[in-house]
Amino acid sequence: MKVFGERNRAAAAVAAAGALLALAACTPGQSAPAASPEVSSVTAPSTGSTAQASTTAPPSPSAAPGTSATVGALVAGFPQKLLPVMPGAKVQSSSFDKTGVPATVALVGKIASPAADVVGYYTKELEKQGFKAVPGETVGTVASKDFLRGDNETVNIAVVEAAGSSTFTIGANVAAESVK
């Protein structure tokens, strides 16, 4: 079971890294043409003034229809029932690819709560949906928890705590019917 848990953690990490790479093109202050209704606008503070700049993320060259990501908000169609935003958390980025098998969902958030509270909240939410926690609580010094439902649905949450706040990343690989 330990090897399977490590594979799940690696798969979730790869999914989260892919989401972050897709979001790397979305830098505040940089403008790009709007590409599709699936990519939403993000308003970010401009440097040196009080004006707001609107940034729209261009589609990834390899993005397929049904794949989307955004910074500072939940992407259109984000499965909030599967991965609810913790009350009080601010969404840093999100992504959703319902075209793949399995479907992949990623959420990055920040909250003024300890890492243990974040892991506890998501453990309760995921267990309500039938996910079972896999043994293990950390990877190195980072709070990290894996969940499994059935034989092939996985979720990983990793939380870094610093200066009184926690930044968390959640990656899920789930059946298409789980994100409808």
Image (cartoon, helix red, strand yellow):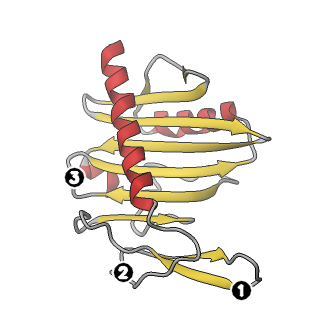
Badge 1: few (under 14), some or many (20 or more) residues near its Cα, within 10 Å? few
Q: Name the residue under label 3.
A: 100
Q: Is residue 130 left or right of 47 when viewed as pictured?
A: left
Vertical placement of 171 versus 98: above or below?
A: above
Q: What residue type is labelled 2?
A: Pro
Q: Reading the chain from its start, which is encountered first: label 2 or label 3?
A: 2
Q: What residue type is labelled 1?
A: Ala
For the C terminus, which image quadrant?
bottom left
Q: Mark 2 points at which residue?
A: 37
Between residue 158 and residue 103, name the one nearer to us: 158
Residue at 25% of width from left, 28% of height from top? 151
Disc 2 to disc 1, how far (Cα)? 25 Å
Residue 46 is drawn in which quadrant? Answer: bottom right
Q: Position of residue 130 (x, y in %)?
A: 40, 34
Residue 141 is drawn in which quadrant? Answer: top right
Between residue 48 and residue 96, name the one nearer to us: 48
**Count of numbered marks:** 3
